[in-house]
Image (spheres, rainbow, N blue to C red):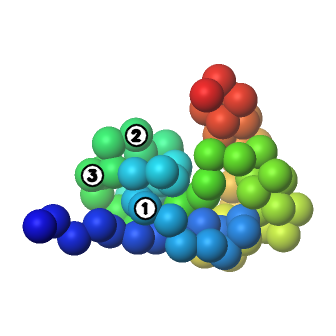
Amino acid sequence: MKKIVQRMCMGCNTKKDKRELIRIVINKEGDISLDKTGKLAGRGAYICDNIDCLEKVIKSKRLERVFNTKIDEEIYKNLRGVIIDK
């Protein structure tokens, strides 16, 4: 039996199955992107597929603290697009 991998959402701090969450990844060059496959190399952070969680992350600047870098507004726009489209 396969083990179900769990990760914590940065917005609501609840543990969920990794497949239910959206992964944001920063690679060695400092490029930030959305990881739809969950297999891109780099440091990952997870967020629920929920606009409320995204707004909490933006307001608290938690993603900036996790990645220790300034997050471009374009990344947040892409996240909003992914969450609203679903």
Image height check: is 37 above or below 69?
above
Residue assigned mark 3: 39
Q: Earlier in the sequence, mark 3 or mark 1?
A: 1
Q: Residue 79, can we see it?
A: yes
Q: Residue at x 66, y 75 (%)?
A: 13
Give the CA separation, mark 2 to mark 3: 8 Å
Count every numbered label the image shows and give the total.
Answer: 3
Residue assigned mark 2: 36
User: Which mark lies nearer to you, 1 or 2?
Assistant: 1
- Return the residue nearer the eye: 9 or 17: 17
Q: Amino acid at mark 3?
A: Lys
Image height check: is 25 above or below 51?
below
Check disc 1 and report its element: helix, strand or loop. Answer: strand
Q: Is residue 82 left or right of residue 23?
A: right
Q: Amino acid at mark 2?
A: Lys
Q: Quick one: which residue is furthest to the front in this view? A: 1
Residue assigned mark 1: 17
